[in-house]
Amino acid sequence: MKFIRRIALSALMLSSSAFAAWPDKPISIIVPWGAGGNTDTVARLVAQGLQKELGVNVNVINRTGGSGVVGHDAIHRAKADGYTLGVVTVEIAMMHHQKMTPLSYQDYTPISRLALIYGGLQVAKDSPYKNANELMDAIKQQPGKLRASGSGLKSVWHLNTLGMLRSAQLPDSAVRFVPSQGSSAALQELVSGGVDFVTSSPGEAKGMVDAGLVRHLAIMANQPSELYGQIPRFNQATPYDWSLTTWNVLAAPKGLSPDIAETLAAAMKKVYASGELQKFANNQGFEVNALYGDALRQFMKDEDARFGRLLVEDR
């Protein structure tokens, strides 16, 4: 009996010392998107901050392909030992509903929410629609006539358009959506008169708004935006309750030790306190809004359900 107790005690001491030593080697952060974009840059700022707080090298690895599936799968398949983390993006709330992968938010251990990017509503400078309510009234009065753009079919800004319509009990066919290769192309089409409105983010439209070519009608925020407080919120400018946000989350594979998860969350709180993430985000036109623990898990669950509803067949 004493021998068994000594073995059990030794195992406990080894387990405790193993955790106490974490981290004792470099940590990797997998990014499912290419180098140079906002998600990649946020990840690199997080890596710098964690490196300072944890005292080990933290490296960013870009694993692109499959419209985000490859990188998200790599995060999921990694060993849940705290040495491989990843940036899980809003696409994880969309891809399994689109039958691209069985992965969902449930396959990760979320650590901290990073960036928030609100959807928006923009028109050209000479548009006859002075506010979001006027535009919604025009859509109701002329179903199928107005054209919109913002992104590819079934990608996030197309879903922003569909959600906006459905909040007013309008069919998806009430607007003709013109797919584009991203917001920049959609805004160019808006300025040239090819579409009547765009539903991309305020940050993506900022350059053309500053140049006087485009006007903001609304931001799809469900709470006051520190960065875009001057833009009317859609659910205040109209009788309709609609909001949409894209986001990304620092996460680990499912099964991460709660102790390591808590250590990472504590380190991220210090990273946020430095202000570097917020400074970069604001300069790029989006916001950083931290969320942790059960509140973060509930947020991801709610977002999964929201995008699931949006991705049902067109009505």
Image: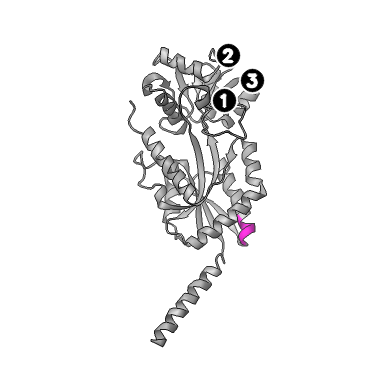
Of badges 3 and 1, nearer the viewer stands 1
Up the image or down, 47 lies above or below 97; here it is below
Query: Label 3: which residue?
Result: 212
Q: Is residue 312 left or right of residue 287?
A: left
Most frequent secondary structure within the magenta stretch: helix
Magenta highlight range: 50-54
- Amino acid under disc 3: Gly
Query: Label 2: which residue?
Result: 126
Q: Secondary structure at mark 1?
A: loop
Q: Residue furthest bottom?
A: 2
- C-alpha span from label 1 to label 2: 19 Å
Give the percent coordinates (x, y) of residue 287.
59, 39
Dot 2 crowding, Cα within 10 Å, few <14, some 14–19, many 20+:
few
Give the percent coordinates (x, y) of residue 286.
59, 36
Q: Nearer the viewer, residue 143 or 1?
A: 1
Q: Secondary structure at mark 2?
A: loop
- Amino acid under disc 2: Asp
